[in-house]
Amino acid sequence: MRLHIDILTLFPGMLDGFLAESILGKGLERGLLSVKVHDLRNWTTDKHRTADDRPFGGGAGMVLKPEPVFAAIEQLQTPGCRRIYLTPDGVPFSTATAQRLSGEKHLIFLSGHYEGIDQRIRDQVIDEEISIGDYVLTNGTIAAAVVLDAVSRFIPGVLGEEKSLTHESFTSTFLDFPQYTRPAEFRGMSVPEVLLSGNHGEIEKWRHARQVEKTRQVRPDLLK
Ligand code: ADE
């Protein structure tokens, strides 16, 4: 087994469909990676299975308690594993991070919770904090799924064609070129002539020009 990922969440059911379906599901089936989702409440000790509490100092919302998280991570962690907290105030996620994490043996993802988690968790049992973008989700479970999905694409064999990794947005500086498939004529809209020409040199040139154009329009920051 190349990579094992444990996901700690208060909403384990959110990931069922995600893990069962699609390309990631096939990777799991074929044993290219393994993922285990854990309900954080399994590490609570009171009869109400309390995982959160009110913040010291006042304020709205609830804060994830340290005890169940410390207990869970201490049980699951292995020497050299990376313990990652998903949070909007983390380091922005990128292709480079996905690629780096795909080379690890064991990752533990901790999904955040409403207003936040006790700082002592972050200080003591978290190695790395990741944000998937400048917006706030109701909880980090979807963020963990996003990171898992992007990481899995770098595990050899998960994507059918290794080629499809190299040609696309964010492995180069440019965004993707437009794609077309049959029919060549659809509701009066035709596929650009050059793509039907069979001239691979011209096709490459056309695609590169479209990439530059698209990047200039949508993400000029990438060209700097
Ligand atoms: N939890 C809530 N919002 C998030 C975000 N943008 N990234 C990672 N985790 C989150």
Image (spheres, helix red, strand yellow):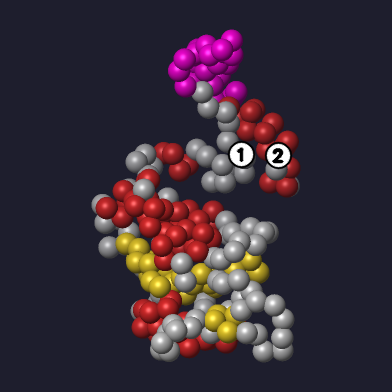
Q: How many marks?
A: 2
Q: How crowded is mark 2: few (under 14 residues within 10 Å), some or many (20 or more)?
A: few
Q: What residue type is labelled 2?
A: Val
- The disc placed on residue 218 is 2
Frontmost residue, 59 versus 154: 59
x%, y% of residue 221? 73, 47
Which residue corresponds to the image point at 46% horizontal and 63% vertical from the top-left? 101
Which residue corresponds to the image point at 42% horizontal and 66% vertical from the top-left? 12
Is residue 204 left or right of 8 when viewed as pictured? right
Which residue corresponds to the image point at 44% horizontal and 82% vertical from the top-left? 49
Question: Dot 1 lies on which element?
Answer: loop
Is residue 25 left or right of 135 when viewed as pictured? left
Which residue corresponds to the image point at 26% horizontal and 52% vertical from the top-left? 30
Magenta highlight range? 181-206
First reached walking from the N terminus: tag 2 or tag 1: 1
Q: What residue type is labelled 1?
A: Leu
x%, y% of residue 7? 42, 68
Image quarter hosting the N terminus: bottom left
The residue identified by callout 1 is 175
